[in-house]
Image: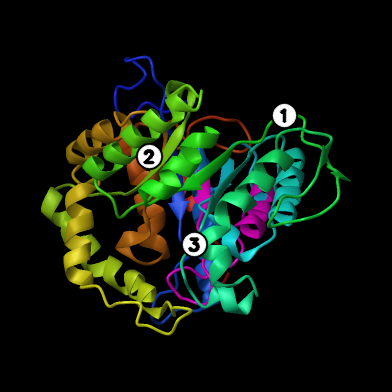
Amino acid sequence: MTADPTGARRAGRGVRTHLFLLAGHRPGGTHTEALADAHHYGRAAEAAGYDGVWIAEHHFISYGVCPSAVTFAAHLLGATRAIDVGTAACILSNRHPVALAEEAVLLDELSGGRFRLGVGRGGPWVDLEVFGTGQDRFDNGFGDALEILTRWLSGEPTVAGNRRFPFRPVPVVPRPRRRIPVWIAATSPTTVELAARRGLPLLLGLHADLTEKRNLLDRYARVAATHGHDPGAVAHASAHLAHVEEADEQAARVIRAGLPALLAGTREYVRLDGTPAGRRDLGAYVDHLIDIHPVGSSRRCREALTLAAALPGVRHLLLMVEGAGGRDRTLEAIARVAADVLGLPARTAATGAPPTVAAAAAAARPAEGA
């Protein structure tokens, strides 16, 4: 199914719509509840008609309590039947690329091709100390790790190491039946150019407005073309905060009330070199996100997504809907964005008939005490 929230299909370019899940911990809750809620949001996405769900990965901070997006994706793939499930993104600086590649092939095979792999460099955090990979791996090793990862996922029967990851040729088992695509989380021109040289699609984050994203995508297209890749054939992904209410200001009030508690978890990052990670003005940042993303009435949200879908090469919109706060509010947001903004036909597991929006949300809501 290809969603058409923006008239993109009429212009001949389909745009698929997904949820982007943080699994964030909120004051008063537990890590167990945060993970269980995120799982229910994934099931709600399938019931409401979204094309997929992408899971964030973080270590040692409450902003997101999922330390392995691959493991979460495996669990959600087993609990769903129709949607794609992706990682947004696995931190490649913390792990061996062959181990991640093997897991990706395994999930792609077991799910019938529904797994999507997004990877990122990550940050200069204490993670590098804990996992023993170090500052040099973060500063200089992303390209080498990506080279091994993509060769393993290319369908080649054997793969040998490179300068940073030296190992003799070994068989690729299980061997992918097709080249498995990899999305690259990118916030800097350097990472954009690295992805472009390899013809790999970008995964653009929440912090950037459409002008910033367009500039990065234009840079990508120039570099990709000089390296023999067709930029028009690459399906980029772009993440956006999304919330709909009857009026713009009502939606803004809801997000101003609910999102800062989630964003406060970003202040828990610890830099490897011991310098402060910074203390962003959360109120100002929330206002910035409201201004640049589809937050408001259904009309404003549709207009914002129309512009997002017009970004060059973007074929996937990842919508973060956890900003309102709380399980019930988020389940309602998932259903309302699907119905009122995207016009998605909801699914039922038994018949495929479209239930009401309320029923779609209720189907994913856990039993009392779960």
The percent coordinates of residue 98 (x first, y second) are: 74, 52
Q: Mark 2 points at which residue?
A: 338
Q: Distance between the residues labelled 1 and 2?
A: 31 Å
Q: Is mark 1 on a helix, strand or loop?
A: loop
Q: Does the magenta stretch include residue 61?
A: yes
Residue tagged by mark 1? 178
The chosen color scheme is rainbow
Which corner quadrant of the image does residue 283 belong to? bottom left
Q: Which residue is drawn at 53% across and 57% down?
A: 40
As helix, strand or loop, the secondary structure at mark 2 comes to helix
* Tag of residue 64: none
Tell which circle, 1 or 2, labels the residue nearer the N-terminal end. 1
Q: Nearer the viewer, residue 73 or 131?
A: 131
Instruction: Determine if residue 162 is in view.
Output: yes
User: Residue 205 lies in magenta, yes or no?
Assistant: no
Q: Where is residue 99 in the image (x, y as percent from the top left)?
A: 74, 56
Q: Which amino acid does label 2 sit on?
A: Ala
Q: Name the residue under label 3.
A: 122
Is residue 224 rendered to the left or right of residue 96? Answer: left
Could you classify mark 2 by the number of other residues whose Cα lies within 10 Å: few (under 14), some (14-19), or many (20 or more)? many
- Residue 292 drawn at (x, y percent): 20, 48
Q: Which residue lies furthest to the bottom in this view?
A: 274
Q: Check disc 1 and give the amino acid type.
A: Arg
Depth check, front residue: 267 or 341: 267
Q: In this view, does 42 lie to the left or right of 282?
A: right
Which circle's residue, 3 or 2, is located before the other in the chain? Answer: 3
Q: Looking at the image, is mark 1 or mark 3 nearer the viewer?
A: 3
**Range of residues picked out in magenta:** 53-78
Labels 3, 2: front one: 3
For mark 3, give the secondary structure.
loop
Query: Residue 168: where, in percent of width, then height?
Result: 86, 50
Camera sees residue 368: no
